[in-house]
Image: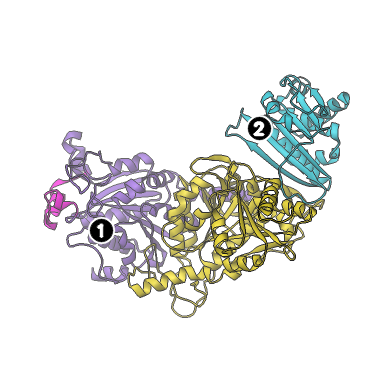
Chain colours: A cyan, B purple, C yellow
Amino acid sequence: MKYEVRFSGTGGQGIIRCAVLLAEAALYDGYHAAQSQVYGPESRGGSSQGEVVIKDSAIYYPKVVCPDVLLCLSQEAYNKYAADIVPGGILIVDEHFVQRTGIEAESVKVYELPIVVTAQDRLQNEMSANVVALGAIVGLTEIVSDEAIERALANNFKAKVLPGNLEAYRVGVELARAAK
Amino acid sequence: MEAVYEKYFRGNLPHIWCPGCGNGIVMSAIARALDKLGYPQDDVLFISGIGCSSRMSGYMDLNTVHTAHGRALAFATGAKVCEPRLHVFVLMGDGDAAAIGGNHFIHACRRNIDMTAIVINNSIYGMTGGQFSPLTPTGKKATTAPYGSIDRAFNLVELSRGAGATYVARADVYHAALLTNLIVEAAQHKGFSVVEAVSTCPISFGRYNDMPEPADMMMWLRDNTITVAQAAKLTDEEAADKIIIGKHFETEAVEYGEEMARLLASAKEAE
Amino acid sequence: MSEKMTNSCKGTANVQLMQGNEACAMGAIKAGASFFGGYPITPSTEIAEYIAREFPKLGRYFMQMEDEIASIGAMIGASMVGHKAFTATSGPGFSLMQELIGYAAVAEVPLVIINVMRFGPSTGLPTMPQSGDIMQARWGTHGDHSIIALSPSSVTEAYYMTIDAFNLAEKYRTPVVLLMDEKVGHLREGFDISNDPEPEIFDRVSAHEGKYVPFANTESGVPPFVALGQGERYHFTGLTHNEAGFYTSDAGKVSEFMQRICGKIEDHVDEIAQFELDAMDDAEIVIMAYGAVARSAHETVESLRNAGHKVGLLRLKTIWPFHTDKVRELCAGKKLVAMPEMNMGQLAVMAKAALGDMPFLPINQVDGRLIKPETIEKAILDKLAEMGGDR
């Protein structure tokens, strides 16, 4: 079993953190995981891409080749990566930021979700959009367990902001289940 | 006095310095200062850069390091931070400290780390045969300034003060007793201290600037130096061409090593 | 051993997601490093940040210097007074350090320089990989000398290899360079050393008989090191020096000195150079690789094996000293040796010299991306076809 996930968007959206959380959760569930990224010189703005390879045996080449799941939180990210998705794979885009042009394969299952707006309106915290997106991915794929994600969140966020992130994750999972 | 010299010198003569060179006077001033300070030789770390004057580290019977051109202060910083008990003296030439090592110099001043920098300023790159340095006075001749230097010179005292050194003094090899006393004071000062020792290089500086004999250069120092107190009575214009000697500046500021110790103590406590 | 190349800790209770750079910093702490002098530079900065956070708690010294020249200068000063000193940098900073790497080599001052290699030359592509500093690590400073350089392929190996780097620096009184690909430095994968045996930590030898001779020509070529300020008043210089540490230009002494400082490393290449062999026993085709590219190469081996080709992996964990004899011996009689590198063929120069007339295929990719397993596979199959072999 090998599963490739790519997260893409704009610098400052927490894209790489999102990839880190998934990779960590995969380890907790007993998989091998490798997380890497490509980023520009900007700390904020510019394009950002994080990726995770999850496998039940040792991972040598650590990069994503054709993602089974692609998340796009910006138009630029969609334009750059959507064509790479494996046939029958999953594309998740933020419906407010991405206008699809059909570059993804026809067999790709597409989910257009209000990720950023949900973080803004329902959670009153735009910063948690990445964790909402993570919830959506896990909700759709069930690639890792909720317990593993919760452990990863607890390991990555200070106690003060942990409840907000756990909530963001649950909201993301709900978004996905509603769209399924 | 002989005893003082012998104790601090390794005796591995001959040295490389030319007749009339001021480096030996500075070396004797340092030996006398160490004697007055009473530091055990084993507790003194003497670090030099590259150039004629920096060969001094090889001649002195201390813990000595002859580093690379301009880098003496960088070496000294790492050593002093790790071994605060050592008394650290850093000897540099004018090109060494103010040109190639200029960045390390200003940052050592800024950190205010407890050590004494002695800059032998002979207004020239002597070892390479007489090229102008950032401390060569404008208009003076050098092999790379055959028509007179068009560069403006640093005033090392003002540079040191501006960069954050907390003790700044200048003396010259004509006033060797003053030089000794200022080195003692600088070493006793807690923080980064700078002593500029204006020196003579009849071979590579004097020769091109109408002072070919060692005595010419000594008379130039005798006739062109004024004390800080004397300078205070003059206008800037009147003092412009004078070499102002004495203690220029002393203040107290947080010393880097003490801050490091405080940081380590508080980090350990927070654990 | 093979497990070190990847995360060896699937599903273990203490598994952590760890970044290569962080693992390096942890390794340095484990090795007993007590001074870090550095200057911020992508993609190595996480190491400085980790050390800035952890060193004070341990009573060790972190300094952010004014540039990389000051960083290595301060490291040398710290090492001279008895501390294990290191830095983390990348191409442009590594370039600035070259002068004093030569100083450390000639004054025999132990140091560890972690160079998280980024795409060059010049500013290049700061966040992207290139194994572009292989030859710079060997010959970047002027004058003849020897050097030790290692290259890790995984996060776990970054940890252990950093410890090795310190041990080698202390043992041979020399600067050691850890040439870590950006792809390894920024990679996060599983890390769990909780069940591993305690690594050996080597501290410089100060013991000596009789009067201390700071640069004595000992049997091993490595003189004992008494820290400055411990009662032996002696002299360090970057000038060519005699056993007492003072300048000499005597032809015999100079020659003896050069033979010693190069020989103390080159003569111990058997001890220093580490390899990892995978599927080499029956291999007809060898892929020789190091760093991040070795991971791609491993997948190529698997895939070509599945297609019926007898392929093996020869992974170079030690880059310098390059063990020419060993490489020749391991590759003797093989049909083809392929060498993928993220550069224009830097270490291939050494491999070619070792292999002589043997069929050799350098595979070079310099586009800021990690070479893919398929790229290596295709190049090998094309070459085999060209050589008239079956495919």
> What amino acid is labelled 1 in the image?
Val
Residue A121, how many percent across, how many down?
76, 19
Q: Is residue B79 visible?
A: no
Residue C293, how many percent across, how many down?
65, 50
The residue at which mark 1 appears reads as B26
Residue A134 belongs to the span the image colors magenta: no
Q: Secondary structure at mark 1?
A: helix
| Magenta region, residue range | B204-227
**Dot in front, 1 or 2:** 2
Q: Residues within 10 Å of mark 1 (few under 14, many from 20)?
A: many
Residue B104, how many percent across, how many down?
40, 47
Residue lying farthest to the front in this orientation: C388
Q: Is residue B266 above or below residue C81?
A: above
Residue C259 is left or right of residue B244, and the answer is right
The residue at which mark 2 appears reads as A48
Which circle marks residue A111 in the picture? Answer: none
Question: B167 or C186: nearer the eye?
Answer: C186
Q: Residues within 10 Å of mark 2 (few under 14, many from 20)?
A: many
